[in-house]
Image (cartoon, rainbow, N blue to C red):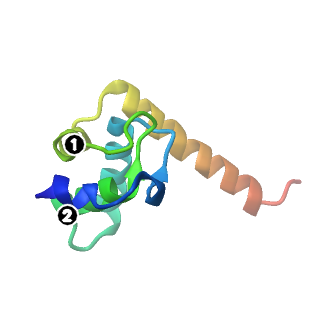
Amino acid sequence: NADSLISQFSNSDKINTKLSVAQLAFLFHLIGSNISKDYNRSNFSKTIIRNFSSMNQPNIDFDSYYNKALKPDEQSYAKIKDLFLDIIHKQMQTFIPKT
C-alpha cells in the first residue's frame, strides 16, 4: 500500500516546495515523461510523494497527485510554465556574457 510506505518517512526527510500538489504533479510528470527511458507514472509518482511535500500538504495523497499529473489546471500550467521560463532566463544570464 502506497500510503503505508509513504508514512514511513518523516516530514523532515522530505524536500519542502513552494508548489501546490497540482503544480508539483504536473512539473514532475513533465520531467519524468521527457527524460526517463522507461517512465512508469505510478512508480515515479510514489517516489515523488515519498520525497517531496507541497506548500500545504506535508504528506501528499497518492491518488490526488497521480490524477493531477496528467490533467493540470490553468493555474498549475501557468505556474510551471513561468517556473521553466524563469530558470532558463537565470541560466542565460549566468552563461551568456553581457555585452
Q: Residue at x 38, y 34 (%)?
A: 77
Where's residue 8, x and y in %?
28, 61
Q: Is residue 2 left or right of residue 28?
A: left
Most extreme residue toward the left is: 1
Q: Nearer the viewer, residue 94 or 63?
A: 63
Q: Residue at x 41, y 33 (%)?
A: 56
Neighbour tally class for label 1: few under 14, some 14-19, many 20 plus, Cα within 10 Å: some
Instruction: Work out whether mark 1 precedes mark 2 in sequence or the reverse, and give the earlier one.
Output: 2
Amino acid found under the numbered disc labelled 2: Asn
- Would you place residue 59 above or below residue 97 in this image? above
Q: Is residue 85 left or right of residue 44?
A: right
Where's residue 93, x and y in %?
75, 53
Q: Name the image quarter holding the C terminus.
A: bottom right
- Disc 2 is placed on an element classified as helix
Residue 70 disc label:
1
Residue 50 disc label:
none
- Would you place residue 14 above or below residue 79 in this image? below
Amino acid found under the numbered disc labelled 1: Leu
Q: Residue at x 34, y 38 (%)?
A: 21
How far, Cα to Cα, is label 1 from label 2? 15 Å
What is the total number of numbered labels drawn onto the structure image?
2
Where's residue 58, x and y in %?
39, 43
Residue 43 disc label:
2
Q: Is residue 5 left or right of residue 53?
A: left
Where's residue 51, x and y in %?
38, 59
Q: Nearer the viewer, residue 29 or 49?
A: 49
